[in-house]
Image (cartoon, coloured by chain):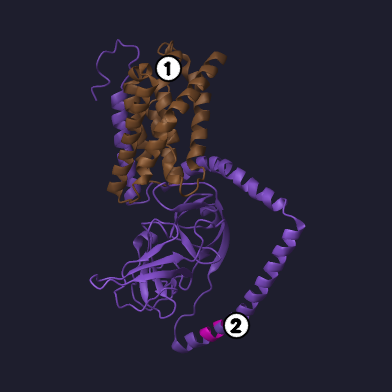
Amino acid sequence: MAASRGNNSNPARIPALGLRTFALILLSIGVMYLDNRENHLDAVRKTIGAAVYPVRLVVDAPVRFWQWLGEATTSRNDLQLELGRLNAERLLTNARLQRLTALEAENARLRALLDARARVRDEVRVAEIMAVDANPYEHNLVINVGSRDGVYDGQAIVDANGVVGQVIRTGLMTAQAVLISDTDHALPVEVNRNGLRTIAVGTGEIDRLELPFLPNNADIRAGDLLVTSGLGGAFPAGYPVAFVNSVTRIPQEPFADVSATPAAALDQVREVMLIWSAPPVSDVPGDAEDPDDE
Amino acid sequence: MSLATRKTQTMSRGDGGRRTPVIVTLVVGLMLTIMPLPDAAAPFRPDWLALLLIFWAMQLPRAWSVGSAWIVGLILDVSHGTLLGQHALALCVIVFITVRFHLLMRVFPLSQLTATVLALLALYQFLLFWINGVAGVSSPLVAYWGPVTTGTLLWPFLFMFLSGVRYRARSRG
């Protein structure tokens, strides 16, 4: 801090530079401490976030315009092809849905018989991903809805094929979500075939998840579908997460080396769905709820 | 190159009146920072705002010093969603060093200045790495050395470009 002293006769010397830097460094440390432990500074984050919003919009605009241009100039032929494809898809989906209605009714009856609480339907809303890159240290995305639209921290995000991630920071008009492929993200899943429960951990690679806690004799094989188990409370149960693509059992190691490919195309999604789920139906008292996700 | 920009600098009183070019470059820098890049290129995104702040702190140390660096850092933290204060602290430190040695840096030849910028960027990323370590954020190491490499390679061009901007803004004003 001797920087600011020295010879003040030099016109190039900036007054009290060292002192100011020192004060700002202390302030930063204080701010970081408050921000890390609790969400004390949510208001500050939201205020600055609102100021950054126009910049995000401007960055997002060319991509949006390009897409719009692509859509606006699609040929009639392409549109008709697309229409045909969508119609076929809708027929198929509807056929499946008919069975689902019956199954849902049956499920409700059985649940009533078992005296279990009825499953509540999840509420869903579509959000668009903004074409902005955020945090360089994690796999994440920014969506164009925020606390104004009822988004909350920890909310689950899925796309048409499977789970994408969850909201970690909610701004007023935008929210930031972490993808399931992030190294700090772990997701309670179960194998759809036999209900085997485990945890899928992100690897930092966009197209690979790891299941590090499966013993060598676990009943899991390549091609198995993993769905959310609903434990942990952040994700509602039953959404597809990933397909197992390789199982390597090494006799000396306690755990098998299992990797899976996310069902959702994490790097290609443009629109996602936010899920407002009712509190998870669970018979396990005090299930492993992660306090960070709440 | 650096000679052209350094005369009359220390005497100038009107730094405050010439904020527009600086603010414009900073906003463009922020846009470049949050602009989407392909996944393969994303770790090599240069630290635009750090480079810009080094330049402006070197040229206009009275108007653009640690305080503005801190505020830019906070904005960067919010738009990145990183720990609030992380980039603020790192930017503050490298701008402090820049301002402290701005007279020296102005007479450096471009090659030597680029080497200095390399050191500053490395320090910047080291501070971020350190804070991430303390806060328990893990990420691949390429996220740290990638920006240092590209930032250093970019610096000579950015320096010439910004010198041009500054020269133009001054001759107009």
Callouts 2 and 1 on one subunit:
no
Q: Is residue A106 magenta?
A: yes
Q: Colour of chain A?
A: purple
Letter of the chain in brown: B
Task: Say if residue A267 shows up in the picture.
Answer: yes
Left/right placement of residue A40 relative to residue A127 reads left
Left/right placement of residue A249 relative to residue A66 reads left
Task: Identify the mark at residue A99; answer none if there is no mark.
Answer: 2
Question: Nearer the viewer's eye, disc 2 or disc 1?
Answer: 1
Tell me the quarter of the image containing the N terminus of chain A. Answer: top left
Residue A220 percent location from the top left of the image: 38, 76
* Residue A188 or residue A274, whichever sits in front: A188
Residue sitting at 50 percent across and 66 percent down?
Answer: A162
Q: Residues within 10 Å of mark 1 (few under 14, many from 20)?
A: some
Residue numbers of the magenta segment: A104-108
Residue A148 percent location from the top left of the image: 54, 53
Judged from the image, the secondary structure of the residue bearing numbered disc 1 is: helix
Residue corresponding to mark 1: B2
* Label 2 to label 1: alpha-carbon separation: 75 Å
What secondary structure is the magenta-colored segment mainly? Answer: helix
Vertical position of residue A140 compared to residue A291: above or below:
above
Chain letter for the residue marked with disc 1 in the picture: B
